[in-house]
Amino acid sequence: MEDVDFYASLWGNSEVVRYIGAGIPKTPPEAKAHLQERVLPRYKNGVGLFAMVYKPENKLIGHAGIIPQEVEGDIEMEIGYWLMPEYWGKGLAKEAAMAFRDYGFNELGLDRMISLINPNNPASIFVARKNGMRYERTVHFLTSTALVYAIQKEEFLEMKQ
């Protein structure tokens, strides 16, 4: 909860949330409720969203992690990330996504991970592909359409050889 003000700043930024859910910013009280009710309860067994800190400036710039998502009735483990716009295009989302991919397979013992991506977000599609993921299908997720990009552990192990 100590990062709630930063979390609210992400949700309040229309550029950041344009590809998240319905693309509608949240007020600070709405963001706080979302953090308390939806994000924090998912922190279990090494899974959750974690603050991204840009080390050269020791500054919070986003969050990333692995979170369980219900997709068409199945629980999938999603690699997700958000960054403040001034940090886009620097390879930081790719770095975070790759770190959580490695963590999910090597430390958590997952067999599969996905990224749910708004079809109009080419930057996240690029990150997913760089992360070894491939397009699998298009789904209705929450209030919008999402592309499912996925990677299996076997594919990950082949990449590492």
Image: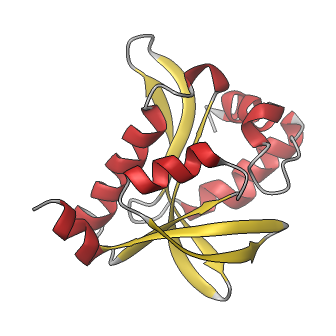
Give the number of marks: 0
Q: Residue farthest to the top?
A: 57
145 over 127 or under it: above or below:
below
Q: Is residue 73 visible?
A: yes
Residue at 74%, 59% (x, y): give it: 37
Where residue 46 sits in the image (x, y, percent)? 38, 59
Where residue 139 sits in the image (x, y, percent)? 70, 77
Residue at 46%, 25% (x, y): give it: 90
Residue at 67%, 48% (x, y): give it: 121
- Report whether 84 appears left or right of 160: right
Q: Quadrant of residue 147?
A: bottom right
Q: How is the image coloured?
A: secondary structure
Q: Is residue 12 visible?
A: no
Residue at 90%, 37% (x, y): give it: 27
Q: Residue farthest to the bottom?
A: 73
44 over 19 or under it: above or below:
below
Where residue 61 sits in the image (x, y, percent)? 56, 26
48 over 87 or under it: above or below:
below
- In this rendered view, identify the residue nearer to me: 92 or 52: 92
Q: Quadrant of residue 86?
A: top right
- In this rendered view, identify the residue nearer to me: 137 or 80: 137
Q: Quadrant of residue 14?
A: top right
Q: Residue farthest to the left?
A: 161
Quadrant in the picture for the N terminus: top right
Where residue 107 sits in the image (x, y, percent)? 24, 62
Quadrant in the picture for the C terminus: bottom left
